[in-house]
Image: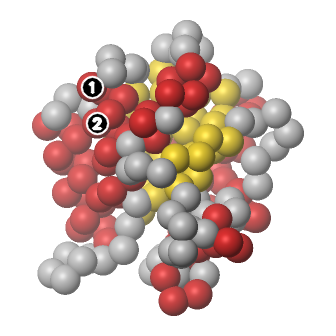
Amino acid sequence: MKTALVIIDTQVGAFTGEWAMPDGDALVATCRRAVAHARAQGWTVLWVQHHEPAGAMDGAGFAIDPRLEPADGEARIVKVEADAFSNAALAQLLSGHDRILLAGLQSDCCVQATAAGGKRRGLPVTLVGDAHHTWPQKDLSAIEVRDQVNRQLAEAGVPLTTLAEVLA
C-alpha cells in the first residue's frame, strides 16, 4: 500500500504571537510522531502552507514551525483557499497513493475543507482524528470543536483513524 502523510498549515503564525494556539505544543508533538513514523516507513510526506497576505500566516508566520521542519525532498504546497486540493499540484503529487493521511491545522477550517475536498475528488483520504487541532470557539473548547469536526467528516464518509492506529 502506497501511503502519504499530508501535514496542513503547521506554520509559525499559528504557534506564536497573539494568534498562538492553546495546546499547540501537543499538536506539534503529535505531528512529529506521525512524521517520524511516515519517514521510517518510507511514506510520502507532504507539507501544506496557507498564505494569507497581511495575516498571521504571512511574513515570518508563513514558515513551517521549525519543530516540524520538512526533510530534503519533501514537497511543500502553498494554498490560498481552505481546501489544500484547490492547488492541483497536491493531487498530482499524491497520484497513485492508496491512502492519504491528513493532519494539522485548523480542524474546523483547512483540515475539514481538505478532507471534504479530497473525498469529493474521489481521493483515498483518511483523517487522523487526534492529529489535528484548532482554537476554541465561543461555547466550545478546541477539543470539542475537533471532535465535532471528526463526527461531521465521518458522517460525510471520510474515514477516521487515530495516531495509535497509524503507528501500529
Horizontal relation, residue 72 to residue 91: left or right? right
Q: Residue 120 at x, y = what percent? A: 27, 25
As measured in the structure, the alpha-carbon distance from the residue carrying label 1 to the one carrying label 2 is 6 Å
The residue beneath circle 2 is 116
Q: Residues within 10 Å of mark 2 (few under 14, many from 20)?
A: many
Q: Quadrant of the N terminus?
A: top right
Residue lying at the far front in this picture: please name it: 53
Question: Which one is nearer the viewer's eye here, 130 or 156?
Answer: 156
SS for dot 1: helix
* Vertical arrangement, residue 149 with respect to residue 135, above or below: above
Q: Residue at x 32, y 34 (%)?
A: 117
Q: Tell me: 6 left or right of 112.
A: right
From this view, report whether residue 118 is shown above or below residue 50: above
Residue 128 to residue 121: above or below: below
Q: Secondary structure at mark 2?
A: helix
Does any portion of residue 149 appear in the rendered image? yes
Q: Is residue 101 visible?
A: no
> Which part of the image, by quadrant, shows the C terminus?
top right
- Image spot of residue 36 (x, y percent): 71, 44
Q: Residue at x 50, y 35 (%)?
A: 87
Q: Vertically, is 70 above or below 38?
A: below
Residue at horizontal 55%, vertical 30%? 90
Residue drawn at the location 61% of the way across and 41% of the way down = 77
- Find residue 86 and report its horizontal and vertical position in percent: 42, 36
Q: Amino acid at mark 2?
A: Ala
Q: Residue 138 sits in which quadrant? A: bottom left
All told, the count of numbered labels is 2
Q: Residue furthest right?
A: 72
Q: Name the side, left or right, on which 99 lies relative to 151.
A: right
* In the foreground, 31 or 17: 17
Mark 1 lies on residue: 120
Is the residue under label 2 in contact with that under label 1 (CB below 8 Å)?
Answer: yes
